[in-house]
Image: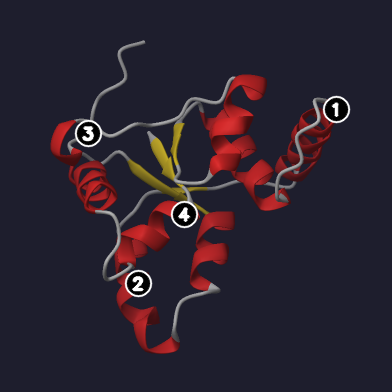
Amino acid sequence: MVLLDTSIWVEFFRHKGSAEIKLAVRGLIEEFEAYLCGPTEMEFLGGVLPKEREQVQAWLNILPYIRNDQHLWRKAASTFSLLRQHGLTVPWNDALIATIALGQGCRIYAADKHFTAMAPLLGLRLYEPGYGGKFTPETE
């Protein structure tokens, strides 16, 4: 399971976005390894142009959705607090997405430096695409 962060979706849909990211996302989708969560969907769709919304939603609709409940918010608050105790301040939405990934035992694919900074403090596993953007199964 690989949870795709908003930063990845931005690059994927950008006309001149990263070819590596575009290939990696397609590979993850083809291998049924790409997952979506509410905070990512809200953050990304909130910035999509109205004329592009239908096409973007069609892509997002094919992905498995990680559901959560009210307990997630308290866990995310603990994650946010832990990061701040270590001198790392990140956007609350990134802490929330990281908490979801940790709770599901999945990796995060992000082009956002906050996730790289959070990874060693939280034990967060980051996804790195393989050759040609194909899915690289976890070896652990």
Please give the residue where the numbered disc 1 appears in the rendered image.
Answer: 85
In this picture, residue 135 sits left or right of residue 120: left
- For discs 2 and 1, the disc positioned in front in the rendered view: 1
Is residue 16 depicted above or below 121 in this figure?
A: below
Q: Crowding near pointer 2: few (<14 within 10 Å), some, many (20+)?
A: some
Amino acid type, mark 3: Phe
Which quadrant would the N terminus be assigned to in this image?
A: top left
Q: Earlier in the sequence, mark 3 or mark 2?
A: 2
User: Residue at coordinates 58% horizontally, 26% vertically from top-left?
Assistant: 119
Distance from disc 4 to disc 2, alpha carbons, whole Å, reads 14 Å
Q: Earlier in the sequence, mark 2 or mark 1?
A: 2
Amino acid type, mark 2: Val
Please give the residue where the numbered disc 2 appears in the rendered image.
Answer: 56
In this picture, residue 83 sits left or right of residue 48: right
Q: Earlier in the sequence, mark 1 or mark 4?
A: 4
- At mark 4, the secondary structure is helix
Q: Earlier in the sequence, mark 3 or mark 4?
A: 4
- For discs 3 and 4, the disc positioned in front in the rendered view: 4
- At mark 2, the secondary structure is helix
Query: Measured from the top left, where is residue 47 in percent x and y?
Result: 52, 74
Q: Are marks 4 and 2 in contact (CB under 8 Å)?
A: no
Query: Measured from the top left, where is residue 34 in percent x and y?
Result: 33, 44
Amino acid type, mark 1: Gln
Please give the residue where the numbered disc 3 appears in the rendered image.
Answer: 135
Please give the residue where the numbered disc 4 appears in the rendered image.
Answer: 7
Distance from disc 2 to disc 1, alpha carbons, whole Å, reads 37 Å
